[in-house]
């Protein structure tokens, strides 16, 4: 076999391997469920972003293909063919140089005009009677949501009505976080001592997943979030359920003992429960059982998961401010019985 033909065999093998690899990678983009897909917008703000991505991607794609193709063609066409092969010596080409300066400048100008107009549009603060205001506060590592007009405080799950602009006033309690519900909006940083605005709007009821998108320490990956969008009626019911003051359990049952433990073990110095405890370090637990997830949205709400969490919070979410209280299984049972009353 001559060296030229072995080289072309190797080339073909390389191309085949490349195609196989990209095939494998692209199957990951198949039709599986993709809950955090920016390219599947479910509201007008996310759609504006998607409408911007498309033309910019086309421009970038055409340039990419052109540059790669020309690089290949020139590398082959002008390759060195013999030991004394010399390229033609040239000294500048003003027309060509002008062209490769002006053309990219025009392309970038068009892209930046498109980008800036969308940015100005989505960064405008939502105003009007129909706008719902929510204060979103990032903590290491969970999200707090306060609804000043409705008097609701909750965590990890942002509940919103559909077809209404939600004006998010975003800040942070500790370090920089980034709020990102990809199907509904872009990402905006949550910065301590600063309020950033973001508008979110959903068109269909449903659960939209997201997560903190700025590295914020040990459990950054455990700082997830979900936006739950409701029809108007369900929204009103959710607000009503989350503003009622929970009844403190009395008597000799597990729930009543759990309520006492909640104070004795120090839970009450970090967590609030309307009418019972006033801590302000961890999430407000007044209506814990209204939530489907807890602890930075890493756990689905269930007795089994609450038990796992209470046994060793820093073991489940590294660096968690909630310490391991070395609770006995019996104490955990009673605390869960109490938490279960926080509907
Ligand atoms: Cu908060 Cu990453």
Image: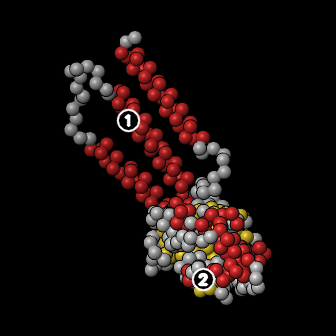
Relative to 209, 178 lies left or right:
left
Image location of residue 136, percent across then percent down: 56, 75
Q: Which mark is residue 306?
A: none
Of residues 330 and 113, the one drawn nearer to the viewer in this rendering: 330
Q: Quadrant of residue 234?
A: bottom right
Cα distance, mark 1 to mark 2?
72 Å
Of residues 266 and 301, the one drawn nearer to the viewer in this rendering: 266
Above or below: residue 238 compared with residue 274: above
- Exactly how many numbered labels are in the figure? 2
Q: Which mark is residue 264?
A: 2
Above or below: residue 298 compared with residue 158: above
The residue where tag 1 is placed is 71
**Camera-side mark, 1 or 2:** 2
Q: Mark 2 Cα within 10 Å, few/some/many (few <14, many 20+)?
A: few
Q: Residue at x 55, y 40 (%)?
A: 25
Relative to 101, 16 lies left or right:
right
Question: Looking at the image, which residue sits at the far bottom?
Answer: 275
Q: Mark 1 Cα within 10 Å, few/some/many (few <14, many 20+)?
A: few
Q: Residue at x 60, y 71 (%)?
A: 327
Say which element carries label 1.
helix
Say which element carries label 2.
helix
């Amino acid at each position: 076999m001559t060296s030229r033909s072995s080289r072309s065999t190797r080339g073909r093998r390389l191309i085949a391997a490349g195609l196989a690899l990209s095939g494998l990678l692209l199957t990951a983009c198949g039709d599986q469920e993709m809950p955090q897909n920016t390219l599947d917008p479910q509201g007008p703000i996310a759609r504006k972003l998607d409408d911007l991505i498309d033309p910019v991607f086309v421009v970038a794609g055409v340039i990419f293909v052109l540059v790669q193709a020309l690089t290949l063609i020139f590398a082959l066409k002008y390759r060195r063919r013999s030991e004394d092969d010399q390229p033609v010596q040239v000294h500048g080409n003003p027309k060509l140089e002008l062209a490769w300066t002006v053309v990219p400048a025009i392309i970038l100008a068009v892209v930046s005009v498109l980008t800036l107009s969308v940015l100005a549009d989505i960064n405008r603060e939502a105003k009007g009677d129909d706008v719902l205001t929510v204060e979103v506060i990032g903590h290491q590592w969970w999200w707090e949501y306060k609804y000043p007009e409705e008097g609701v405080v909750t965590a990890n799950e942002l509940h919103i009505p559909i077809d209404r602009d939600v004006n998010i006033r975003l800040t942070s309690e500790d370090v920089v976080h980034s709020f990102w519900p990809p199907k509904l909006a872009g990402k905006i940083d949550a910065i301590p001592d600063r309020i950033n605005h973001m508008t979110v709007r959903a068109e269909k009821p449903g659960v939209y997943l997201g997560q903190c998108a700025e590295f914020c320490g040990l459990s950054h990956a455990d700082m997830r979030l979900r936006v739950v969008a409701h029809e108007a009626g369900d929204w009103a019911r959710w607000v009503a359920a989350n503003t009622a003051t929970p009844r403190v359990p009395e008597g000799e049952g597990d729930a009543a003992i759990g309520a006492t433990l909640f104070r004795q073990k120090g839970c009450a110095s970090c967590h609030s429960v309307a009418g019972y405890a006033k801590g302000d370090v961890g999430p407000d637990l007044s209506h814990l059982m209204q939530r489907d997830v807890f602890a930075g949205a890493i756990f689905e709400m269930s007795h089994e998961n609450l038990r796992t969490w209470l046994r060793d919070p820093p073991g489940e979410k590294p660096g968690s401010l909630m310490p391991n209280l070395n609770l006995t299984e019996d104490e955990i049972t009673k605390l869960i019985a109490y938490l279960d009353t926080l509907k």
